[in-house]
Amino acid sequence: MKNIVILISGGGSNMAAIVRAAQRDNWRKGLGAEVKAVISNRADAGGLAFAREQGLAAEVVDHKPFPSREAFDEALATAIDAHAPALVVLAGFMRILTPAFVERYRGRLVNIHPSLLPAFPGLHTHQRALEAGCRFGGATVHQVTADLDHGPILEQAVVPVLPGDTPEALAARVLTQEHLIYPRAIAHFLRQAA
């Protein structure tokens, strides 16, 4: 069985979309894969309750007590490795990962970013897209590399920028597409890895 571990920091809407798709499409039977655990760096992450309701391991590795990013990443990796992951999925995990962590999971670490990469890596993507006068926004699923919000693109969704759009309105439209493309990209990735 290919175990999937999902990392979150907040409400976990992308995580929930992935879990629901895995259940609906029976990834266990069709792909030999299942979501095994959800791990957050924040004990108050709303997505943990959803994970527990689904019968998933829901764990916290709080980043605050660690003296360095490297120390946190090592503890996080220990928690992840306990589930023997074939794939580690970043779903709103709001921590920059160290190069050593990324290397440890090279080829099996994916992320979703709320822009059409390579445009607007980092934060405040929707505000930056509006300020630049973009006619389109979107989301990108990509493999994670040591370069922030770079790496091979697995799938993208395009969303039009509408007259009078605010960053919040654009973000809401992009998020609906994220919920569609992230599970699809993961399923495709798992099929290719078979």
Image (spheres, helix red, strand yellow):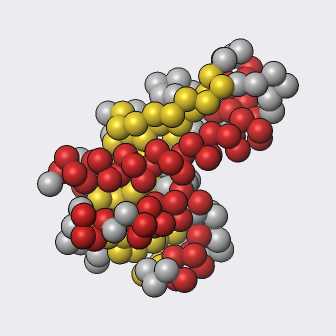
Q: Position of residue 158 (x, y in %)?
A: 55, 29
- Residue at 42 percent across and 81 percent down: it is 57
Relative height, residue 136 to residue 84 (above, below): above
Relative height, residue 65 to residue 88 (above, below): below
Residue in front for this viewpoint, 34 or 63: 34
How many numbered circles does the render carry? 0
**Residue 30 shows in this picture:** yes
Q: Where is residue 77 in the image (x, y as percent from the top left)?
A: 33, 66
- Single out the residue that lies furthest toward the right: 164
Q: Position of residue 166 (x, y in %)?
A: 81, 33
Name the quadrant of the N terminus: bottom left
Q: Residue 153 appears in which quarter of the rendering? A: top left
**Residue 98 shows in this picture:** no
- Residue at 77 percent across and 41 percent down: it is 168
- Residue at 62 percent across and 22 percent down: it is 136
110 sits to left or right of 14: left
- Single out the residue that lies furthest toward the top: 133
Residue in front for this viewpoint, 82 or 98: 82
120 sits to left or right of 88: right
- Residue at 18 percent across and 51 percent down: it is 193
Residue in front for this viewpoint, 182 or 124: 182
Name the quadrant of the C terminus: bottom left
Q: Where is residue 86 in the image (x, y as percent from the top left)?
A: 24, 62
83 sits to left or right of 161: left
